Image: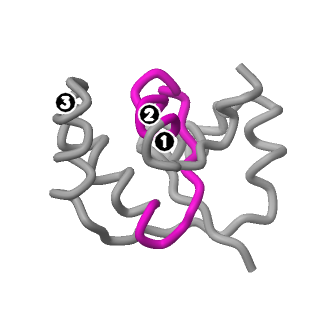
Amino acid sequence: MSFVVLDTDVASGSLRGRLDDPLRARLTGETFGPGSGPLGRTAGRAERRGRPRPVNDTWITACCLVRDLPLATLNLKDFRDFADHDGLRVIGINER
């Protein structure tokens, strides 16, 4: 069984049947769930890079990193900095 964390836009789109086919196909068979993690450490690194991030995006990133889970999001620009610098795996980041 594999897990993936959903950003709220993906969770909402999934519940409403509004995910595009490529993303829906990537998520088929995955188990979705939350995690918890080192929020302050992740936020501090972003701040030092001169790229302070919103608390909600930082919290989602920290949850993914501490559990080594990928994130499915439609807001790729919100998480690209974390992917580039912190090792966040984002589903769909290379497809768009």
Residue at the extreme bottom of the image, as rendered: 1
Q: Nearer the viewer, residue 24 or 17?
A: 24
Q: Residues within 10 Å of mark 3 (few under 14, many from 20)?
A: some
> Which quarter shows the N terminus?
bottom right
- Indicate the position of residue 41 as horizontal and vertical percent values: 21, 57
Q: Which mark lies nearer to you, 3 or 2?
A: 3
Q: Is residue 40 left or right of residue 95?
A: left
The disc placed on residue 12 is 1
Of callouts 3 and 1, which one flags the residue occurring earlier in the amino acid sequence? Answer: 1
Q: Which mark lies nearer to you, 2 or 1?
A: 2
- Residue range in magenta is 65-84
- Picture residue at 17% right of the left edge, 35% below the top: 47
In this figure, which residue is indicated by the disc labeled 2? 79
Q: Which quadrant of the structure image shows residue 92?
A: top right
Residue type, mark 2 in image = Phe
Of callouts 2 and 1, which one flags the residue occurring earlier in the amino acid sequence? Answer: 1
In this figure, which residue is indicated by the disc labeled 3? 52
Q: Which mark lies nearer to you, 3 or 1?
A: 3
- Picture residue at 59% right of the left edge, 48% below the top: 89
Q: Secondary structure at mark 2?
A: helix
- Picture residue at 42% right of the left edge, 39% below the top: 82
In the image, residue 4 above or below residue 88: below
Q: Which quadrant of the structure image shows residue 90?
A: top right
Confirm whether the magenta stretch covers residue 66: yes
Q: Is residue 52 left or right of residue 95?
A: left
- Indicate the position of residue 8 as horizontal and vertical percent values: 41, 43
Residue type, mark 3 in image = Pro
What distance separates the C-alpha of mark 2 from that of mark 1?
A: 18 Å
**Majority secondary structure of the magenta segment?**
helix
> Which quarter shows the C terminus?
top right
- Picture residue at 76% right of the left edge, 42% below the top: 24
